[in-house]
Amino acid sequence: MVRLPGICNWNKETTVLAHLNGGGSGMKRHDLLGSFSCSACHFWLDGDYVHYGATKDQRDLWHMQGMIRTQQYWLENGFIEIKRGEMKDREIEFLEEQIGEIEKVLLSTEHRYRTLQFRLYLAKLGKELFAERILKLCHTGE
């Protein structure tokens, strides 16, 4: 669900889960931090983006947009479920870490208007506190 214009081959038979970068040497991030990707989009994400003049930040932004669409698909089709109630400390810590990664990308790109997409997505998951944090960060730079 990365859907890169001019790159995507839209071939469902080549779809794989493309994990976000940053899992560490020889490690992959959790499957929730990935997006469905055709073979062409996956190749672009894995390094071919440099041949198109894109930056790592631009690559990450496209990847995170695909991750949002993938997570939305999983939520809507019952593959993942958001449980209501108190969050455990480790869950909060995990979410804060991931929000921190998103904040880094948002701060380093010219695409600050995309914050609204993240806010709507996070608010839908009941994480309004994190959505407000991202929005404040993008408006104030703090």
Image: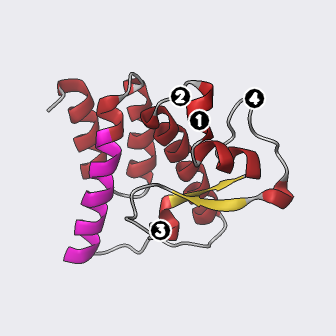
The verdict on residue 18 being magenta is no
Measure the C-alpha gap from mark 3 to mark 1: 20 Å
Give the residue type that dot 3 points to: Lys
Q: Amino acid at mark 1?
A: Tyr
| Residue 107 picture quarter | top left
Q: Nearer the viewer, mark 2 or mark 4?
A: 2
Q: Which residue is mark 2?
A: 54
Q: Earlier in the sequence, mark 4 or mark 1?
A: 4
Q: Secondary structure at mark 2?
A: loop
Residue 120: percent from left, percent from top: 43, 42
The alpha-carbon separation of the residues under discs 2 and 3 comes to: 23 Å
Sequence-wise, which precedes: disc 2 or disc 4? 4
- Judged from the image, the secondary structure of the residue bearing numbered disc 3 is loop
Alpha-carbon span between mark 3 and mark 4: 27 Å
Residue at the extreme left of the image, as rendered: 142
Earlier sequence position, callout 3 versus callout 1 = 3
Prevailing secondary structure of the magenta residues = helix
Q: Mark 2 touching mark 4, by CB under 8 A?
A: no
Question: Label 3: which residue?
Answer: 28
Q: CA distance from mark 4 to mark 1?
A: 12 Å
Q: Which residue is mark 1?
A: 49
User: Label 4 sits on what residue type?
Assistant: Gly
